[in-house]
Image: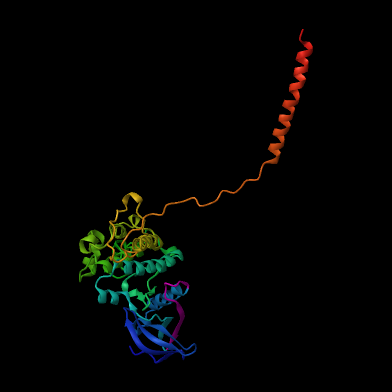
Amino acid sequence: MTPPGILNDRYQLVESLGTGGMALVYKAKDLMLERFVAVKVLREDFSVDAAFRERFRQEAKAAANLSHPNIVTVHDFGLDQRHLFIVMEFVPGTDLKSRIHEKGRFEVQEALDLMVQACQGVGYAHRAGLVHCDIKPHNLLVSPDGRLKVTDFGIARALATISPEERSDVVWGSPLYFSPEQAAGLPPSPASDVYSLGVILYEMLTGQLPFNSPDATELARMHREVQPVPLRALNPGVPKALEDIIMKVLSKEPAARYRTADQLGRLLAGLQTIKDASTRPQPVIAPSASTVPVQAAAPEHAPAPTATSVYPPPPVAFDTETPEKKSPDWGTLLLWLVAGAAMFGLIPFWLYVYLTLRP
């Protein structure tokens, strides 16, 4: 396929960024706004197929309605010289699959940072009523500053159009990453995307996929029937709590997983918080007086101990406040005077009565 140099007299194709099953992606320059964009051009042999043309249009429509920092923004959609194309935000960097090939195995913290972002993007799509249906590291773009964005909503499904009874002989998705229900031709759900995110996280932490086979049919069977090797058997550095989360995500039954990517993202973010807290410097607690060692008198010419070589004894709390002089309570004093006067004034009276009545 030889695409035109300029689409719609506006988008000048600069270089190829990659190829997919039904489209090619190019870096292009928007001549009107003078910025770089990514242009996905439908393959010519698919362009004549009405069904593929409609799917391509639906992808543009579905993605254009999503506005989130972790989702690639769609700017435009058009047809030029029988070439259907979608114009998207250009994300510098590479896809996550290339990063996995380069690194082999991610550090836990880096894997969590990227996966939390993926969950935020996919979770936003779930809240908007869409199931991505094709979550794989090739569709997760990572910029040099660590920003992750989800792309390629080519086979996304609107939740409102999915019937629980539907069954299809055509399996959509990537066999290495799709869920057991997708492998069986059953309808996808947000839990299907969660499973795929779990497969990606498993691969990032262990350097290998939970299931691998050159045969797509065998891969589908493994997703439906085979239990993956526990992560810590392949990477003992993975925390037990994280292993438990991922093994739950890889459950065969959708009901046994987390229902949406938002739920998974919150749990992974919680592990990030625990990890961050464990790496913060701990406060130094001064020893009590009973635990401070008694230091022998230093020789006359011995160097003075530095602040880091001796634990200073805990300070003794002294009450250094001088009590304030209280002003006399004149009311109380007056009452005492009145009472005293009354008492001493009655003594002569009772003495007179006693002497008068005495026989």
Residue furthest to the top in view is 359
The answer to which quarter of the image holds residue 130 is bottom left
Please tell me which residue is depicted at 77% across the width and 15% down the height of the picture.
353
Q: Quadrant of residue 296?
A: bottom left
Give the residue at the far right of this rendering.
356
In the rendered image, the vertical position of residue 132 relative to residue 75, given as above or below = above
Report the number of discs.
0
- Seen at 70% across and 41% down, the residue is 330
State how the image is colored. Answer: rainbow
Q: Is residue 70 magenta?
A: yes
Q: Is residue 353 left or right of residue 263?
A: right
Residue nearest the viewer, comparing 162 with 4: 4
Q: Residue at x 47, y 80 (%)?
A: 75
Confirm whether residue 27 shows in the render: yes
Residue 279: x and y in percent read 34, 63
Q: Quadrant of the N terminus?
A: bottom left
Residue at image point 77% right, 13% down: 355
Question: Could you tell me residue 258's position as x and y percent?
Answer: 36, 58
Image coordinates of residue 243 in percent, x first then y, are 28, 59
Q: Can I make out residue 228 in this image?
A: no
Q: Nearer the viewer, residue 37 or 21?
A: 37
187 or 139, nearer to the observer:
139
Point out residue 151 in the picture as x, y percentages from the top left corner.
Answer: 38, 74
Which quadrant of the figure contains the C terminus?
top right
Above or below for 330 versus 148: above
Q: Which stretch is magenta?
A: 65-80
Q: Is residue 115 magenta?
A: no
